[in-house]
Amino acid sequence: MKKLFLWLALINLQASFAQGFFNNSGQSATMQDVLHSDCCLLGQYKISGAISTFYNKISYESADYKSIDYDRYGISFNINAKFYKELQLRLSLFADLNQNKDQPKWLSNFYYALGYYNWRNKTFSYGYENYQPNRFDGSYNLLDNLKRGFFFISYNYYLLGDKSPLKTDETAQIFVSPFVRYQPEYTNRYGTAVLGNNKITLGTSARYVIWHNFYTEGAVYFYPQSGTELPWDPDFTYGFGYFDWKSFKLNFSYGNWIANRFPGHKKEMKNDFTNGEFKLSFSYIW
């Protein structure tokens, strides 16, 4: 599996760079020239994604009640295929490079999503996303996992007008997105026992792009049904980084997405800043 990911990454990079040296007139061209040409279907913005390396610490309790800190690091390959307007299929593949006895069995080999993702102001996004322990080794039933993804709808809007004093440059903006999620079936953290059905999650996420694509972000979550907030479900999430959506850009990010609790709320899992994910990624657009 590691070799497959490395080959995918290498082929993608070679193809991208090989096609960036000449424009349609046979003259020397930059990557930006190629992206906005008709050469080899480039510049159509139909396929995008990133090749990344990542690291995070996973803290959990083993079957014999021992506390374990597992250092996860590896390579990921993300691809987003746009079919019609903003209708997209999203796929993320993971290759773990630190495989040992402490590696949790529920770590995913891939995530997937299908939805209408509209980044524009005052628009809706909706679809289906699956972040379950999807694995290639057959240890989890993919059809069962299909029921455990969630359907979502969100509304996107921008807070900063052109004359806002917070508008430090053309990238500066505050993006806010309230959302609703519906999960037909949910399980324990290991994905081995069904805990309930028809789970609803409400929340709002926000990203503040401060200056030249540097951002900070966060989200708050509310679980209206009693007993449905599980130990790893967050009250809030947070992150920061640098993100330039254009092709052939190097981006970095930090995100902390599980088990964060507001003061006064019971915390059942170990989670702190060191359990967040650090990621360095190279983006592409085809």
Image: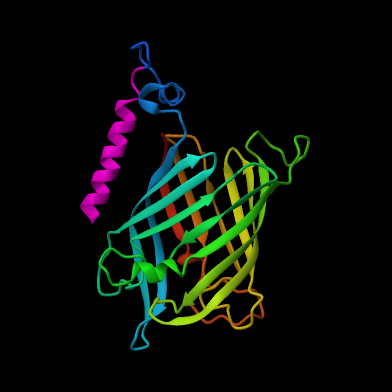
Q: Residue extending furthest bottom?
A: 64
In the rendered image, the vertical position of residue 5 relative to residue 136, given as above or below: above
Q: Please tell me which residue lies in front, 241 or 237.
A: 237
Q: Quadrant of the N terminus?
A: bottom left
Q: How many marks?
A: 0
Residue 235 in view of the camera: no
Q: Please tell me which residue lies in front, 272 or 184.
A: 184
Let me know if residue 278 is in the magenta part: no
Q: Residue extending furthest left?
A: 3
Residue 178 at x, y = what percent? 67, 58
Decide if residue 98 is on the left or right side of residue 49: left
User: What secondary structure is the stretch in magenta mostly built from?
Assistant: helix
Decide if residue 78 is on the left or right side of residue 222: left
Residue 108 at x, y = what percent? 36, 64
The residue under the point 67% across, 80% down is 264
Q: Which residues are magenta?
A: 1-22
Let me know if residue 19 is in the magenta part: yes
